[in-house]
Image (tube, rainbow, N blue to C red):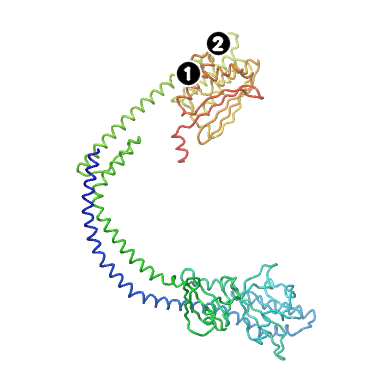
Amino acid sequence: MNQLVWGAAQRLRGSRRFATKMILALLVVILIPTLTSVLFYNASSKLVKKNVRVSSLQLVRQAADALSAIMLAGTDASNILYSDVKLQQAARNASPTPEEEEAYKTYVSNLLNNYVGSNSFVKTLYVLREEGTSWGSGSFKLSKIYVQSLDDLEWARMARLKDGKPAWGKLAYDPYSGIGDINDLVLPVTRVIKDFESLDDIGYLLVNLDGNKILDRIGQIRLGDTGGFFVVDESGTIVIDRRLDRLGQPLSDPELREWAASGNAAEFEHEEDGVRFYHIKQTLTNGWSVVGSVPIHEITDQLTSMRRMIWTSAVGFALLAVAIGLVLARQVTKPIQQLTSQMKVAEGGDFTARTEVRTKDEIGLLSRQFNKMIKRIDELVREVREVQESKRQAELRAVMHRINPHFLFNTLSTIKWLVRYNQSSKAYDALSSLVLLLEANMGKKGSFVTLAEELDIVAKYLSILQIRYDTEFRLQLDIAPEAETFPVPRMLVQPIVENAVFHGLVPLGGGGDIRIEASATEEAIAIAIRDNGRGISPDDLQKLGGVPQGAEPAGMTGIGLMHVREWIRLYYPPGSEMRIGSGGEAGGTVVHMKLIKPKGEREQREEG
């Protein structure tokens, strides 16, 4: 084997020399497409930058158009409501009668609510007066009006400066709607309501556009991965931004603020915290500007991707050259590696290992011989296992042939005494129970039954004993459903029940209770057999708990318990056991059996 590996190493070194030549030749060849790619990159980078500028300008126009459409809904609502004659009358009448006040309330509230319902961008509408009643749509709270004088508020001051024209405010929370402090995010447009006759200020008309929809619209238009849009007023102060903490704040960079507030070029670049940003803007109809901002590296990803692709291609072709050079060496070493791998598998005890080398050279011949050898070893191992299993089954049958006469002896002895004392009826009942019991035992094939079937045998056996002793032995069962179908050797439980009757209950001169419990876990079945008889002395407990293998215990019950232990030892995995103990304060005796599930059954349960 060592000579074979040494020879493989020699061939591998020879193939590596050939692979080196192939690699060098291919590396020279790949220089041609690499140089071509570099030239293509230089030519296309200018075109990409131009396309980026055009695309960015289109995006900022798209954002401006979307905002303009929403803001137009606000100005339209303001104009329509401002020119409504009945609303003008309601706002002008400072001292209406109760009937007029109710009529105004009904009309104005319906007017405002109907308009809000017909326009998805208008969130709320208010007609506010410093004195007298004010009206609003939706969840308008009149009590919130009197918190502060309207004339002292910033939006009211701006509306008075506009003298009847719309005055736009920054994105803010609506102070006059909602429950408690829960308010809607809105973009307000306010105007003073003028008396058509005297041109005096008689109130304020406040139109609130849905701020969340505005943010959603501009949020749908993205620049790069992290870039986005915001809106500034004529002074460079931020009035619309998804980052609400920036609202009302001037742009931090002076040059950027000056550019955003001026009518200069639509594009601007500057550096902030070591990152260069690209900015574009578009002016809105009210004098505000939509500004798009994005890190430059995000909008030049195409160039970066192209440059990365060129270098990746160069490296990829180089690796391809190396791979082609190594393929020839692999053609020699792969069969040897596969054969070695399967040898290690067989060394670990898995004799199903087979190699797939089908070449017609010496390595293929070695592979075929290895497969034949492993196949023969696997057959021999299977034969040994079958012989061992046959021996184990023979031992189980021997144990069964010893325990069955024991059981039959006790039963026939009972019937004999019934006949002797002319208790023909009870003898007949005992024989009938014995027939049923023998049918239960002989009606099954094999040495094992389910736990439920074994307990049925126990019940028939107790009925025989009740006839013999003319007393009642009560059997109580508490069996988990998972334990009922667990396979056990025939008469695994019966000798223990027999022991409980003869040595626990009968000496007390009356009947008694026998309780059998069984529970199941993933690993094992636990069986407990309890009686309320006279209990067991420490000496007897030591004798029954420690009968050595091969010893001949005294009495039929000793034989039964010994064979129960033999069954557990022969059939169940290591760790299975039977323990006999005292019933404690409740009296009597308790026998615990722990039957560990065979490995195959546990695997089937896990797969199921």
Are there few (<14), some (14-19), or many (20+) residues within 10 Å of tag 1? few
Residue occupying image coordinates x 23% and y 56% = 20
Which residue in the rendered view is the most extreme toward the top? Answer: 420
Q: What residue type is labelled 1?
A: Gln
| Rendered image: mark on residue 549 | 1
Front-most of residues 601 and 444: 601
Position of 227 with respect to 6 (left or right) is: right
Label 2 neighbourhood size at 10 Å, few (<14), some (14-19), many (20+)?
few
Please name which of the two marks, 2 or 1, marks the residue nearer to the observer: 1
Quarter residue 254 falls in: bottom right
Mark 2 and mark 1: span between their CA atoms? 34 Å
Residue furthest out toward the bottom: 197
In the image, residue 57 above or below residue 596: below
Q: Locate residue 507: give its quadrant.
A: top right
Residue 537, image x, y percentages:
61, 17
Q: Where is residue 6 in the image (x, y as percent from the top left)?
A: 23, 42
Q: Mark 2 points at which residue?
A: 416
In percent of width and height, residue 403 lies at: 49, 18
Residue 155 horizontal/vertical position (percent): 66, 80
